[in-house]
Image (cartoon, rainbow, N blue to C red):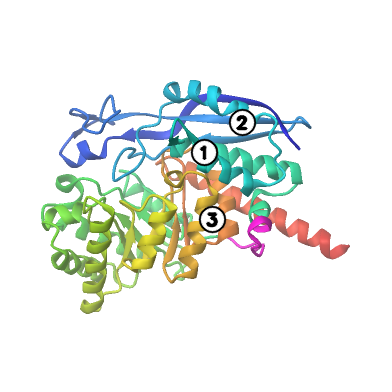
């Protein structure tokens, strides 16, 4: 089966691009926007509309495969590729990628994904968002050609077992960190709430007091709202390096504060993502190692999740090999081609570090559904609910895709058994 036609279409992602550096440096919220000047190259404003480019591949039998090029909310931060905008890249994609896609045989996903992931134009690899979207479309094309689910393609080409069992989901609240928690409890999400603690004064507190109060509130809210006593979600909070800011990057003081948060969480497991941003990969590994070791000395079971400076597959390998954290976020758009996501999850699973298949609120329904199939095949510890920050919408997209896929696997297994 070959690709006969390729179309690239600009569109909107499910959230916004935010200049993380400007927000950390005190850009103030004004309604849903931010006041202040952008600080990260490429940004026109501190917050601007998220964009995507849909990759539409028509196959020779008339079927159509789609993938969405999308980039993370905080593009250009912590070593990530620069801002991704449709008008800047569509002409480039038509000139350089369309001729390579049309006429391509799609019987093998991995071979095609690796080609585009390693492709260089004028001495430079493609933007991670482009590699992300093209690989999604190629995976669907291979699935259509083989008349099977996308996860089945991954399992077949990686020689993985097909497991018709859900992967736990992790809800993200955005700034609606109180009302959204009630929604997550009612829908019994596996981990919550993300929290978006990206500002010291408003969300963390100069001494960390606001986050401490929030963690204590979370534990009590789950106890009071849950409808079955057995429901015990993990608490997973992303702090974007802000804890490091209030403790002058002193790893002992950071760990001691995290241990206090763990006590406030009570019987609920607590993971803190990105407690510090050390400004580079090697310093980040060293800082997370020091924090993790100090937590162990204190007898705390708070888990550290790597995010900043852990962007590519090779980064995931290095953070995992260093055993500097308990869990690694595999931020799907940052890895480029989606086969790298599978490789990263497998590496974590095989080397004693928990794999969290994350991503960004700034993706699309297409990329989120594809990520469900990656998770079902590769089996991370949890998967992020996405896209968007409204929770319910992303939960609908991800949870229902997972349920449908598992149901289809069961039907296929039943048909095979009947034969």
Q: Could you say which is closer to the camera, residue 366 or residue 178? A: 366
Residue 109 spot, x, y in % from top left: 65, 46
Instruction: Say which of marks 1 and 3 sits in front.
Output: 1
Q: Is residue 272 left or right of residue 403?
A: left
Which residue is pictured at 25% across the width and 30% down the height?
46
Q: Is residue 214 something that shows in the picture? A: no
The quadrant holding residue 103 is top right
- Report how many numbered discs are placed on residues in the image: 3
Whether the residues at callouts 2 and 3 have beta carbons within 8 Å, the answer is no
Q: Identify residue for label 3.
A: 342
Q: Could you say which is closer to the camera, residue 395 or residue 12? A: 12
Mark 2 or mark 3: name the one nearer the start of the chain: 2
Residue 88 spot, x, y in % from top left: 42, 23
Q: Is residue 103 left or right of residue 395?
A: right
Q: Which residues are magenta?
A: 155-166
Q: Secondary structure at mark 3?
A: helix
Q: Is residue 403 left or right of residue 148?
A: left
Q: Identify residue for label 1.
A: 119
Using the image, tell me which numbered label, if any, was put on residue 257.
none
Q: Residues within 10 Å of mark 2 (few under 14, many from 20)?
A: few
Quarter holding the N terminus is: top right
Whether residue 217 is situated above or below residue 334 in the rendered picture: below
Whether the residues at callouts 1 and 3 have beta carbons within 8 Å, the answer is no
Q: Identify residue for label 2.
A: 100
């Amino acid at each position: 089966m070959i690709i006969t036609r390729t179309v690239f279409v600009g569109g909107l992602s499910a959230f916004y691009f935010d200049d993380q550096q400007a927000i950390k440096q005190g850009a103030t919220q004004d309604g849903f926007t931010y006041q202040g000047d952008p600080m990260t190259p490429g940004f026109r404003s501190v917050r601007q509309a998220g964009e995507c480019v849909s990759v539409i591949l028509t196959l020779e039998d008339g079927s159509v495969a789609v993938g969405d090029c999308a980039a993370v909310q905080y593009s250009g931060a912590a070593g990530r590729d620069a801002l991704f905008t449709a008008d800047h890249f569509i002409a480039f994609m038509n000139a350089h990628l369309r001729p390579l896609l049309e006429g391509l045989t799609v019987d093998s996903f991995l071979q095609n994904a690796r080609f585009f992931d390693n492709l260089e134009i004028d001495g430079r690899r493609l933007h991670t968002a482009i590699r992300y979207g093209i690989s999604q479309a190629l995976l669907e094309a291979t699935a259509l050609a083989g008349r099977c689910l996308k996860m089945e393609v991954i399992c077949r080409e990686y020689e993985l077992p097909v497991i018709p069992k859900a992967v736990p989901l992790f809800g993200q609240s955005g700034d609606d960190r109180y009302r959204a928690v009630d929604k997550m409890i009612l829908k019994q999400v596996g981990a919550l709430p993300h929290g978006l603690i990206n500002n010291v004064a408003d969300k963390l507190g100069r001494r960390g007091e606001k986050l401490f109060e929030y963690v204590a509130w979370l534990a009590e809210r789950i106890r009071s709202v849950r409808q079955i006593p057995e429901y015990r979600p993990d608490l997973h909070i992303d702090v974007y390096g802000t804890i490091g800011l209030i403790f002058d990057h002193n790893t002992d003081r950071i760990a001691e504060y995290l241990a206090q948060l763990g006590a406030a969480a009570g019987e609920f497991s607590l993971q803190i993502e990105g407690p510090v941003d050390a400004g580079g990969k090697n310093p980040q590994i060293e800082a997370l190692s020091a924090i993790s070791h100090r937590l162990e000395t204190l007898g705390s079971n708070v888990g550290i999740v790597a995010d900043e400076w852990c962007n590519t597959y090779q980064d995931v390998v290095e953070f995992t090999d260093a055993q500097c954290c308990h869990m690694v976020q595999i931020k799907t758009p940052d890895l480029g081609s989606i086969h790298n996501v599978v490789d990263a999850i497998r590496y974590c699973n095989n080397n004693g570090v928990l794999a969290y298949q994350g991503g960004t609120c700034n993706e699309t329904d297409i990329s989120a559904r594809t990520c469900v199939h990656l998770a079902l095949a590769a089996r991370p510890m949890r998967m992020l609910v996405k896209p968007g920050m409204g929770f319910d919408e992303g939960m609908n997209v991800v949870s229902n895709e997972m349920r449908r896929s598992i149901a289809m696997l069961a039907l296929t297994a039943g048909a095979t058994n009947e034969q």
